[in-house]
Image (cartoon, rainbow, N blue to C red):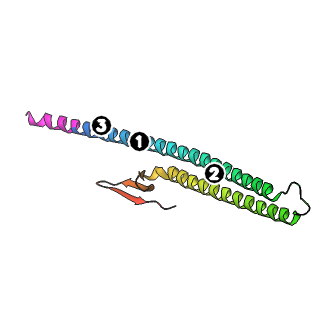
Amino acid sequence: MKDGPEKPLLSERLKANMQAAEQHHADLMASASTSFETDIKAILKNAQTTIARDLAAQHRAIKTEIEAELNHLRKQLGLYHQARKWSPLLLALAVLFSLLLVLGATWFWATSYQEWRTAKSLQSALDDSQNGYLLLNLTNGTLARCTPNQTTITCKDMKE
């Protein structure tokens, strides 16, 4: 008679333990997902700040270099005192300076666009993280989407 009542008690305890384990697993997965998303957002913000700072420094350096070169050319050619004599050269320098400014602005725009595109790509990857987990490969900087199955975790590299 002892075997009869104990089996349902063991079965109930086993079910309760399984439910507690499943809840604990779900809590751990939710915590890991939130932590990973926060880490990726912090990395993204740091990268954006670094890129913006580097672009501003490069822009200032290019501008200073162009101004220094123009001042050097003005002094070397004596443009201040002989403006009429050197007007074709002044025109050529103005065209060259304009061309350099256009090229600099184009370069600055292209790098800003690339930064925006990268940020947009990472943001969309973060927005899609509801379908699994994102893993960042620190050796080559690639992202992979991982989805857990019953017995395995499947990861697939993400393309831009």
Residue 77 figure quarter: bottom right
- Which image quarter is the N terminus in? top left
The residue positioned 70% from the left and 58% from the top of the image is 104
**Location of residue 10 with respect to 47 vertically, above or below:** above
Q: Which badge, 1 or 3, comes first in the chain's sequence?
A: 3
Residue 86 position, x and y percent, is: 87, 63
Q: Secondary structure at mark 2?
A: helix
**Nearer to me, 132 or 156:** 156
Which residue is the site of mark 3?
A: 20
Tell me which amino acid carries mark 3: Ala
Q: Are marks 1 and 3 in contact (CB under 8 Å)?
A: no
User: Total of numbered circles in the picture?
Assistant: 3
Q: Nearer the viewer, mark 1 or mark 3?
A: 1
Tell me which amino acid carries mark 1: Ala
**Nearer to me, 16 or 3:** 16
Residue 39 position, x and y percent, is: 46, 42
Q: Which badge, 1 or 2, comes first in the chain's sequence?
A: 1
Q: Which mark is residue 58?
A: 2
Q: Secondary structure at mark 1?
A: helix
CA–CA distance between discs 1 and 2? 42 Å
Stretch of the chain drawn in magenta: 1-13
CA–CA distance between discs 1 and 3? 15 Å
* 76 drawn magenta: no
Residue 150 position, x and y percent, is: 31, 53
**Magenta stretch secondary structure, dominant:** helix
**Nearer to me, 100 or 8:** 100
Which residue is the site of mark 1?
A: 30
